[in-house]
Image (cartoon, grey):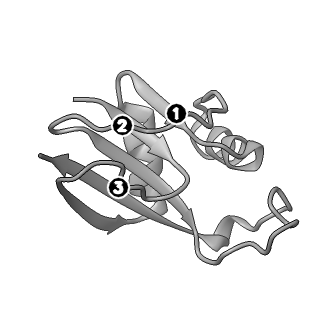
Amino acid sequence: MKIKVMNSAMMPHEGQYDCRKISKKEFCEAIQNADGLESYIGYPQNIDLILRWTGVSLPLCRDSTTFEEGDQALVMRLDYRVSPGEKGRPVQESDFSFFLVTFRR
């Protein structure tokens, strides 16, 4: 089982995705306590926020995400769509919702 950290909830494969909303505190504690996190965070400001909140430095990564049986994702999702040309603009810490996603085939 792998734990992926993502900035959106993706469903790249056919299967069952159990997605439940978690608190920012639960998100941060899960990152701090996880072994072998895989980062799929594609925005520097998200990486900076995670570092500030948790003390954990994750690499910037825009690779495609894949899931295997039992993999989980910790998702920090921006609560609104950013207009074209505004991606990467500063965001507020309160602009995010957090989720734990578990994948089953």
* Residue at 88% in and 66% down: 85
Of the numbered discs 2 and 1, the one sitting upstream in the chain is: 1
Q: Are marks 2 and 1 in contact (CB under 8 Å)?
A: no
Q: Nearer the viewer, residue 53 or 71?
A: 71
Q: Pointer 1: residues within 10 angstroms few (<14), some, or many (20+)?
A: many
Q: Nearer the viewer, residue 30 or 13?
A: 13
Of the numbered discs 2 and 3, the one sitting upstream in the chain is: 3
Q: Which residue is mark 1?
A: 39
Q: Choose top left, top right, bottom left or bottom right for residue 41.
A: top right
Q: Choose top left, top right, bottom left or bottom right for residue 77.
A: bottom right
Q: Choose top left, top right, bottom left or bottom right for residue 75.
A: bottom left
Q: Pointer 2: residues within 10 angstroms few (<14), some, or many (20+)?
A: few
* Residue at 81% in and 69% down: 84
The circle on residue 11 is 3
Residue type of the residue flagged with mark 1: Ser
Which element type, helix, strand or loop, lies under badge 3? loop
Of the numbered discs 1 and 3, the one sitting upstream in the chain is: 3
Q: Pointer 3: residues within 10 angstroms few (<14), some, or many (20+)?
A: some
**Is label 1 or label 3 in front?**
3
Residue type of the residue flagged with mark 2: Thr
Whether 82 is drawn above or below 100: the answer is: below
Specify the farthest residue to the top: 36
Marks 2/3: CA–CA distance: 9 Å
Q: Which residue is mark 2?
A: 66
Marks 1/3: CA–CA distance: 16 Å
Describe residue 2's horizontal placement relative to residue 45 as left or right: left
Residue type of the residue flagged with mark 3: Met
Which element type, helix, strand or loop, lies under badge 2? loop
The circle on residue 17 is none
Residue 9, position in %: x, y? 43, 59
* Residue at 55% in and 53% down: 7
* Residue at 60% in and 29% down: 58
